Amino acid sequence: MQSKVTMLTRLFEANRNEANAGPMKKYMKNHFPYLGIKKPQRSQLEKQFFLETGLLKEPFNREFICELWEKDEREYQYTALVYLEKSLNRLEKTDLPFMEELMKTKSWWDTVDAIAPKPVGKIAEKFPEVVAETIDGWAIHENLWLRRAALLFQLKYKGNTNEELLYQYIRLNAESKEFFIQKAIGWALREYSKTNPASVKKFIEATKLAPLSVREGSKYLA
């Protein structure tokens, strides 16, 4: 696996752009260094990498993701997320603890918001028992990113959303002062309002929520 990571590293290093790296780091509140490879170019490089290595034709490989997660520059974590998204149909119930560790490591909204609605959402869709076994615990976890993940894992479920569960998780976190929790509540409500606006409107009116959550959640409501 090291050889594949080495190939990707060489490819990315050859396209390092210091002029871009500074502003990209600043945009992410200086939490992570960047190579300075913007998404359109990175997508082309990733396409080249996956084509040349045949990695997507191989069994799902956590080691590849772990290697990229350990690297300093944020673009490597983004490529790991792309690999995850391209591997959704190969994820199993046993991969959920791995998703949790990824969200708890080098945590920020950019990685958590990619993992929660896609890999976690997919696993929970295939194996509904993980909600009671694991995700219920996230909703009240001391780690704010896991709480955010619990709020967002149904984001793409549309008509299959477990409304009762969504509202339950929101109520559990409604008094949070954390920006990222308040924002997640609003985002989850906004997305679900596209499917069931009347229900969301009623819930917002009946529930004491932070102004940010109400503003975000009401965006598409009449």
Image (cartoon, helix red, strand yellow):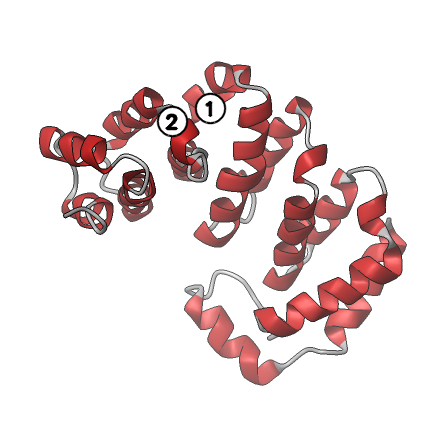
In front here: 92 or 221? 221
Residue type for callout 2: Ala
Res. 140 image quadrant = top left
The residue labelled by disc 2 is 139
Give above or below for 62 relative to 82.
above
Label 1: few (<14), some (14–19) or many (≥20) C-alpha neighbours in 10 Å: many
Give above or below for 132 relative to 212.
above
Residue 56 spot, x, y in % from top left? 80, 48
Give left or right: position of 97 versus 180. right
Res. 40 image quadrant = bottom right
Res. 73 image quadrant = bottom right
Q: Residue at image x 17%, y 44%?
A: 214
The answer to whether the residues at label 1 and label 2 have Cβ atoms under 8 Å apart is yes
Give left or right: position of 172 versus 123. left
Residue 176 spot, x, y in % from top left? 24, 36
Residue type for callout 1: Ile
Q: Residue at image x 77%, y 38%?
A: 60
Q: Residue at image x 81%, y 57%?
A: 5
Give left or right: position of 202 versus 23. left
Give above or below for 8 relative to 136.
below
- Asked which secondary structure carries label 2, the reply is loop
The residue labelled by disc 1 is 135
Residue 222 spot, x, y in % from top left? 14, 48
